[in-house]
């Protein structure tokens, strides 16, 4: 039995999605020359500004392409479903956003992405384009705290891209942009829980089995099996489970400010996300932590997977300024 | 017997056909410990190689491998893209400046590719990756040749070592790549990258044995 999907041809899913995105958001997005897998913001890159290139596999929309636009990422290299883009579109993006102030690559920490972006960066150095890289590592469940550099990047990309994009838009130097990216990543924590599997357009098979009464904590955004499988709890129990894991690392004290992202992995509806957020806000309030801003919705998906993730960013004055800076992207705006 | 660019093109065509047939099996293996797309990536990559070789008709064995590297990389990305692109580039470099390659020398393809995968991925034996098939195959080629074995035995040794290496990944806990996050839960499953590596080594050996 094949999973149900509204597609034409699994092998063409990514290209047809990109066609549709460009048709909808042609005012904001375009692509480089003959490479529709290299998407660039029409009004983002400019002389003297640090270029921000993000990217990764498809299937996580609006991550990554939806965050391309003025004030956020300048370009996005689009990979196949759940697969890193090859160096070619990454290099096309790099050339398109280079304004002479350096280019910063921001993406999730996965072996494939690291190899392809590193190959691109090595080749760009031959063209005298100065590239730096910051990997996102916000997924608490993916490695112990003392091995933070091994953790994968998940929904927390949203905050790292947003704040670094703001720094670049404010014409800060490459050193400053890199510092903001690292600082944001260090203070961003995500834990997800999945309640059903997802299926790739090319295979249309569930990529793992999950019992009707089960959930998996720490599920990756590529449908990699998670870290612990447990009986499905109530929303409050699940949020408490997640928030306890985040509080164990978050250094926010009473009076500190945070930003919250309650994210659907694909098919979990807003109703459930808001029920989740109710408990998240209670848990933060109990500790006297002030919620500066909350986003609830689909920001980093895993195809049609059911489940949700909670991301907390520990703000300070500098990061708050970056968070509130306006941006105008295809699928996300701050006014 | 001398192998030309046309022969190596035929070798890639043979690998591509076999990989296409194993696509679903490789996806299933990947579904246990990864994201179930390995068969698709490999099919896309080798499909792109065959297409590029048909269009460009490279003149030398080195050109064949360089064309393979570029087309595989840009079709796949992912992890296998850079790993196999580097492997093909090293194989191409091993035959640089030669119009043809003597059949007895051809098993160095396996050694060169293993070197490329190791350099790019930096995995060690026992990490539960494709290296667990590539490296034993390369060592088998080296040892059989040093012992002065005939070509058929060199190839048989390489194929056996790759198959045993892939099989052995079932007893390993992943420590590199995406499945490393699973820790102990990766036990009991064959690494899909090692499985496809054993298939590729097997097809190279089969092709050379029949040449």
Image (spheres, coloured by chain):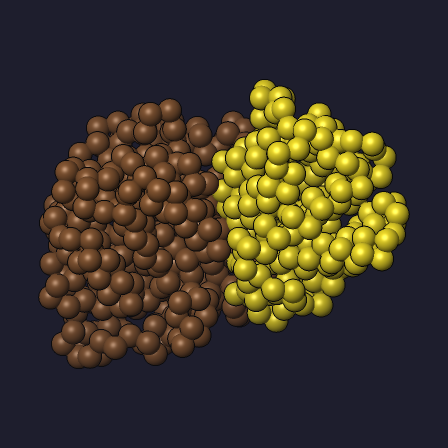
Chain colours: A brown, B yellow
**Residue B169, position as x, y percentages in the image:** 70, 62
Q: Is residue A125 left or right of residue B19?
A: left
Q: Quadrant of residue A46?
A: top left
Whether A144 is drawn above or below A317: the answer is below
Number of on-image labels? 0
Whether B132 is drawn above or below A253: the answer is above
Quadrant (top left/top right/bottom left/bottom right) for the N terminus of chain A: top right
Q: Is residue A286 left or right of residue B209?
A: left
Q: As rendered, which of A218 and A150 lies closer to the eye?
A: A150
Q: Is residue A299 left or right of residue B186?
A: left
Q: Quadrant of residue A210?
A: bottom right
Q: As rendered, which of B155 and B12 lies closer to the eye?
A: B155
Residue at screen point 27% across, 56% down = A160
Question: Looking at the image, can residue A11 be seen?
Answer: yes
Residue at screen point 27% across, 68% down = A187
**Residue B144, position as x, y percentages in the image:** 82, 55
Quadrant (top left/top right/bottom left/bottom right) for the C terminus of chain A: top left
Whether A210 is drawn above or below B14: the answer is below
**Residue A215, position as x, y percentages in the image:** 51, 63
Residue at screen point 11% across, 66% down = A317
**Residue A159, position as x, y percentages in the image:** 26, 56
Q: Quadrant of residue B11?
A: top right
Question: Looking at the image, can residue A60 be seen?
Answer: no
Q: Is residue A188 left or right of residue B72?
A: left
Q: As rendered, which of A265 and A85 lies closer to the eye?
A: A85
Q: As rendered, which of A283 and B152 lies closer to the eye?
A: B152
Residue at screen point 14% across, 46% down = A169
- Residue most extreme to the front: B97
């Amino acid at each position: 039995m094949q999973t149900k999907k509204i597609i034409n041809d699994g092998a063409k899913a990514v290209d047809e999605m990109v066609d549709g995105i460009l048709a909808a958001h042609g005012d904001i997005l375009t692509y480089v020359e003959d490479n529709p897998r290299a998407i660039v913001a029409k009004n983002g890159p400019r002389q003297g500004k640090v270029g921000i290139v993000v990217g990764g596999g498809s299937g996580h929309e609006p991550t990554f392409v939806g965050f391309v636009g003025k004030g956020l990422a300048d370009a996005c290299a689009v990979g196949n479903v759940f697969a890193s883009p090859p160096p070619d579109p990454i290099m096309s993006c790099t050339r398109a956003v280079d304004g002479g102030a350096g280019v910063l690559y921001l993406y999730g920490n996965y072996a494939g992405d690291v190899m392809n972006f590193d190959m691109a960066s090595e080749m760009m150095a031959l063209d005298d384009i100065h590239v730096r890289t910051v990997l996102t590592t916000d997924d608490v469940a993916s490695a112990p705290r003392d091995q933070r550099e091994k953790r994968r990047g998940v929904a927390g990309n949203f905050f790292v891209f947003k704040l670094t994009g703001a720094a670049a838009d404010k014409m800060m130097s490459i050193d400053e942009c890199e510092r903001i990216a690292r600082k944001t990543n260090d203070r961003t924590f995500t834990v997800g829980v999945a309640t059903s599997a997802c299926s790739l357009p090319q295979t249309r098979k569930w990529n793992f089995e999950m019992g009707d009464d089960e959930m998996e904590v720490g599920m990756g955004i590529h449908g990699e099996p998670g870290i612990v499988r447990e009986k499905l709890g109530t929303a409050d129990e699940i949020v408490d489970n997640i928030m306890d894991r985040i509080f164990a690392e978050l250094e926010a004290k009473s009076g500190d400010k945070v930003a919250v992202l309650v994210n659907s992995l694909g098919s979990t509806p807003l109703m459930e996300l808001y029920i989740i957020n109710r408990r998240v806000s209670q848990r933060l309030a109990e500790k006297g932590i002030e919620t500066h801003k909350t986003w609830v919705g689909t920001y980093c998906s895993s195809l049609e997977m059911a489940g949700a993730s909670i991301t907390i960013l520990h703000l300070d004055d500098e990061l708050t300024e970056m968070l509130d800076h306006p941006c105008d992207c295809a699928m996300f705006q701050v006014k | 017997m001398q192998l030309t660019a046309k022969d190596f093109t035929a070798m890639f065509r043979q690998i591509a056909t076999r990989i296409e047939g194993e696509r679903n099996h490789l996806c299933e293996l990947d579904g246990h410990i990864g994201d179930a797309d390995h068969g698709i990536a490999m099919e896309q990559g080798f499909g792109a190689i065959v297409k590029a070789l048909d269009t460009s008709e490279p003149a030398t064995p080195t050109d064949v491998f360089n064309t393979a590297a570029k087309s595989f990389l840009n079709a796949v990305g992912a992890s296998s893209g850079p790993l196999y692109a580097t492997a093909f580039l090293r194989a191409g470099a091993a035959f640089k400046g030669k119009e043809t390659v003597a059949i007895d020398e051809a098993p160095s393809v396996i050694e060169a590719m293993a070197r490329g995968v190791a350099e790019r991925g930096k995995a060690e034996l026992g990490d539960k990756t494709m290296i667990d098939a590539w490296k034993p195959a390369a060592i088998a080629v080296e040892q059989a040749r040093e012992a002065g074995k005939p070509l058929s035995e060199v190839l048989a040794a390489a194929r056996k070592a790759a198959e045993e290496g892939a099989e052995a990944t079932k007893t390993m806990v992943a420590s590199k790549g995406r499945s490393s996050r699973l820790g102990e839960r990766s036990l009991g499953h064959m690494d899909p990258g090692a499985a496809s590596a054993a298939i590729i080594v097997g097809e190279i050996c089969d092709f050379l044995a029949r040449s």
